[in-house]
Image (cartoon, rainbow, N blue to C red):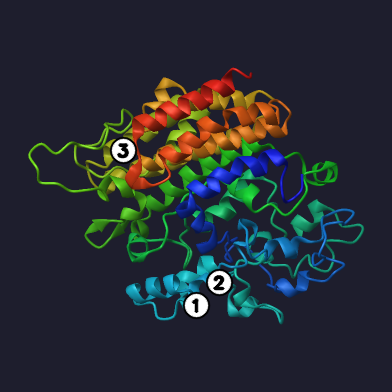
Amino acid sequence: MTVAHTGALRWSFRPFLRAFQTICLVLLACGSVWSVARAAGTYEGVASCAGSTCHGRNEGDGKVVRQDELRIWQEPSSKTGAHSRASAVLSTPRGERIASALGLGKAGSATACLGCHATNAPASARGARYQISDGVSCEGCHGAASGWLSSHYALPATHASNVAAGLVPLERPKVRAQVCLDCHFGSSDTGQFVTHAMMAAGHPRVSFELDLFSSLQQHYNLDADYTRRKGRVDSVQMWAVGQAEAVRRQATLYADPKLGTEGAFPQFYFFDCHSCHRGISDKPDARRTFETNPARPIPFGNPPYNDENIIMLSAVAKVLAPGQGASFDAAARAFHAAMGKGRGEAAAAAQKLASAAGALSDTLSARGYSGGTAFQVISAIASQTTTARFTDYTGSAQAVMAVDTLLNALVREGRVTVGAAAGIRANINRAYAAVSTPEGYNPSAFRSALGQATGAIGRLR
């Protein structure tokens, strides 16, 4: 599968790119950085990878890898080039306004920004060709190259030996998720956490879905050679592990007292933005626009935690790890309930939720995946137990991304034809339209559209 993806993938992502401009802006504004604390060695810079005999060709005609990876990485007009533009976006009027509001000075040199907008290696680890203006560079995801750059392409080097020399094994779902989440949710490292203040200043809301984001950034062919060297990549596994690691990361950071609170208030970055950012009316007959969520035992009027990934992980656990699903759901309910008790209780419950999500991640990483797994997960997302939880914009947006991603997996595996998938597109588009803007979100319209789409997919099984 080339970087342009199959026709089915290109067809499927088009409505996503139209309907989720705000969410996708995160790809321009944030990078996926393998934390420098975990990546020993010297960062040699993009120029070290750019030779025409390496990754700098204009055409992807290499015998082992494409060799035009640099061209794809710096593509100016598509999402595949988002990481190369991450540093430049800091100097845009929007970037400067955000930095000015926060008192950070110039955004292009602000530590709070560079942790995700660039591969911000320590001064002592910067090689002669390193440039911070490269944005999120090759080494931002693949790791500092000094240990493997000169040997990774030559015999007798293998993928295993390259990993041993410091190459980050991104084919492993847990590893890839942890790398991406450093910026596509946040980490405790300097400059890798988006606060509520940053979003109030204009930073886009952060959203994460591992398989979809991986596809948007893909610069390699998933061919027989890739499988021989690195193993088979399964989209359902990538999506499921991504959900588990997202919940683990979120809960872990929330439990951190340095990140979970901001002065006298909780750090509202963790909460559902749209539960507070809605119209306010003093009219005595004002109509409530929210719906009670059956999985959130929180006091009336409290802002809910943003549980978009929790909802998805609960659905996938029922199918792929049923023995752990009930305990995860119990941990999630206890976490929501603890929000009404106090910071200490909430932090303790967050740690238990992180542990339950981590156990699910281990199970989902280790288990096998059959051709019908995607059908089963889609059915779980569409079940009455799950759809009753689609009461908020963020959870619903995550759900339609999931169904779209899993349908793509079925097309790639030959379980569903492109023509049959095209027939479902109208319903998926309606579901996207229902979450195209937060202010226009309609829970019942969304559930109807998603139900029709998932029902049509189920009939193809």
Q: Circle 2 is placed at which residue position? A: 87
Gap in angstroms between the C-alphas marked 3 and 1? 38 Å
Looking at the image, do the residues carrying marks 2 and 3 touch, with CB atoms under 8 Å apart? no
**Residue plotted at (56% across, 27% down):** 377
- Establish if 452 lies above or below 334: above
In which quarter of the view is residue 152 placed?
bottom right
Res 389 seen here: no
Q: Secondary structure at mark 2?
A: loop
Name the residue nearer the viewer: 445 or 241.
445
Q: Circle 1 is placed at which residue position? A: 108
Q: Residue 394: where, in percent of width, then height?
A: 40, 43
Looking at the image, do the residues carrying marks 2 and 1 touch, with CB atoms under 8 Å apart? yes
Amino acid carrying label 1: it is: Gly
Q: Secondary structure at mark 3?
A: helix
Gap in angstroms between the C-alphas marked 2 and 1? 7 Å
- Establish if 105 lies above or below 412: below
Q: Nearer the viewer, mark 3 or mark 1?
A: 1
**Residue plotted at (40% across, 32% down):** 446
Left/right placement of residue 74 relative to residue 250 reads: right
Q: Quadrant of the N terminus?
A: top right
Amino acid carrying label 2: it is: Ser
Tell me which label, 2 or 1, sits earlier in the chain.
2
- Establish if 11 lies above or below 449: below
Res 146 seen here: yes
Gap in angstroms between the C-alphas marked 2 and 3? 37 Å
Q: Residue 135: where, in percent of width, then height?
A: 60, 70
Tell me which label, 2 or 3, sits earlier in the chain.
2
Q: Circle 3 is placed at which residue position? A: 336
